[in-house]
Image (cartoon, coloured by chain):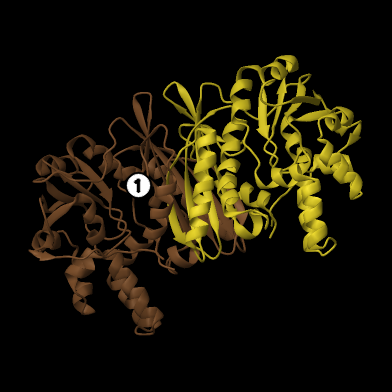
Chain colours: A yellow, B brown
Amino acid sequence: MNELDIIKIISKNLSYSNGVEKGIGDDCAVFKFENQHLVVTTDMMFKSTHFPSILTPFQIGMRVVTANVSDIAAMCAKPLGMVISMGFDNPKKTFIDEMSKGINFISKEYGCPIAGGDTNKAPELTLSGTAFGITDNPIYRGGIIGEDICITGDVGKVNCALKLLEMKDKGILGNIEFEKTMSEFPRIMKKLAEPKARVKEGLLLNKIITSCCDISDGLSKDLNYTGNFEINSKNLLNSVSREVIEFCEKFDMDLLKTVLNSGEEFELLFTTPDFKKAEEKLKDINSVTKIGKVVESGKTVDGISVELEGYVHKW
Amino acid sequence: MNELDIIKIISKNLSYSNGVEKGIGDDCAVFKFENQHLVVTTDMMFKSTHFPSILTPFQIGMRVVTANVSDIAAMCAKPLGMVISMGFDNPKKTFIDEMSKGINFISKEYGCPIAGGDTNKAPELTLSGTAFGITDNPIYRGGIIGEDICITGDVGKVNCALKLLEMKDKGILGNIEFEKTMSEFPRIMKKLAEPKARVKEGLLLNKIITSCCDISDGLSKDLNYTGNFEINSKNLLNSVSREVIEFCEKFDMDLLKTVLNSGEEFELLFTTPDFKKAEEKLKDINSVTKIGKVVESGKTVDGISVELEGYVHKW
């Protein structure tokens, strides 16, 4: 049984949907609200499955906010606020203090105040956030044939950082080598530890793009939301940072696969009829790369079919 | 360390509150939006701490919805929708099917559609709901001196049901006696297994009451939200159901204490300058009992000081 099986059973049973504009199946649920749309998302995290060991309590706090707000950004909506439920197995004052400082710091950066929550006893640290936002024009997943497929920023760092942690955990890298590699590739671990939700980007792009999602499961999985696609690897790799290229060379990793399967990047993946305008809009805050096109049939990179990958919970 | 210590640390750190009308410290967080108020609440539940063993999967589904929607009812707001994050340790098709049917059944009854969620691996069954509602007049906790303190329906059954389960678990009652007692007091276990959120009551009371909360931690704790109070036990016990009275007699339990410390009843506790009107408004759907008055000083039942009780998570 995997999470897709579970979602199938649940979706079938949740037939009551009075007043819901968009239910299960996008970055956010959407409700009509006065003359606006209320967009809502929820993301639950458990210590053992969601938080890399390298994260500080402050960064754990940042992450639960970022993961939720990123879905608001993916609807190109303005954050309104958030609530966070917390479960603790063994709460320590310093941990809670640092974590809540991280939550507050990043919520301010996003303009998304934390307005409430719930605290509980739990078998392990459990954080469940729900963020909501407002927009007059929610941007859904999708894609129109012929449009350009674009991403903000660059992807790949998170996958490299996870590889680095794995090499340490498996003893392939000793502590000294690990630390040395960390300082050689500082931006890689930083992106894993402190990814950012692209709120400003989403708001600026709202009126000039036709579909959007955040890159949370990895491009190769998230690209499926655009329908069929042709990706040009040269264009995609042009956006990749030097650190990722050098890291892949150093550790003999396939660069394209590393980039395609890098999850929790929280950059925006969108389609637009006007790439130039998107690039112009974001010129002061982030890069935009045209990585391919929405096409009538086939899901290809340089003409070769790609498989759905990315992370799916399994039991 | 208990949850009040945790909430204190977190509340101090969450200083960013731009646009929040009401943050931590009421049944719901409140945001001003256009000419309305969006009310939001979140409630996280773990199998080992929140779900009595007697609950069926269908009833577990109902409960996570009811616990959240009850906070919307306590603001006298109209439910708009809800999202539910779920963590499973060992997901079984039949369990998920039944649970989601329970969720759908009750969400329809409350007019509160489930519009999204998140599924995860977890150390034990974990359900975290966030419900939203709308109102032009959110009713907060509080109370004005001289006003009547009232409750909808009756309380006490949940405490009796928990006592019955405890007697079974401790072997004080054998299986046959347990089943016999269950059938002798059918409404007691029903209230534990299938409590209802008082959505209709909240909406009808909105313009004629000045404060409201739901009875979730037990009257003796929840009464503190009204400020100072004088409770008249005779009036309170007049509202108690015959089953609770007989159960307490049979098992030699203090009736008043049982009633005062019965949590998760989800009835509304409110203050009003016009008890008669409140009673009249609810006459077709629920009883209303005047149990006391908001006073200038002291927290008393029949003139005797009462201590804060009710459930607080401790580690």
Return the residue nearer the eye: B101 or B157: B157
Q: Which residue is mark 1?
A: B71
Q: Position of residue B44 (x, y in %)?
A: 46, 54
Quadrant for the C terminus of chain B in the image: bottom left
Q: Position of residue A143 (x, y in %)?
A: 71, 25
Residue at 74% across / 18% down in the picture?
A: A275
Return the residue nearer the eye: A172 or B119: A172
- Chain that bears disc 1: B
Residue A33 sits in which quadrant?
top left
Q: How many marks?
A: 1
Measured along the vertical axis of the image, is residue B79 above or below residue A98? above
Residue B52 sits in which quadrant?
bottom left
Density class for disc 1 (Cα within 10 Å; few <14, some 14-19, many ≥20) is many
Return the residue nearer the eye: B167 or B22: B22
Residue at 40% across / 39% down in the picture?
A: B111
Measured along the vertical axis of the image, is residue B140 above or below residue A282? below
Quadrant for the N terminus of chain B in the image: bottom left
The residue under label 1 is which amino acid type? Asp
Q: Position of residue B23 (x, y in %)?
A: 37, 42
Measured along the vertical axis of the image, is residue B309 above or below residue A160? below
Residue B97 sits in which quadrant?
bottom right
Q: Can you see residue A129? A: no
Return the residue nearer the eye: B89 or A242: A242
Residue at 17% across / 68% down in the picture?
A: B256
Which secondary structure, mark 1? helix
Q: Taking A165 as reference, is B193 left or right? A: left
Q: Can you see residue B268? A: yes
Q: Position of residue B121 (x, y in %)?
A: 63, 58
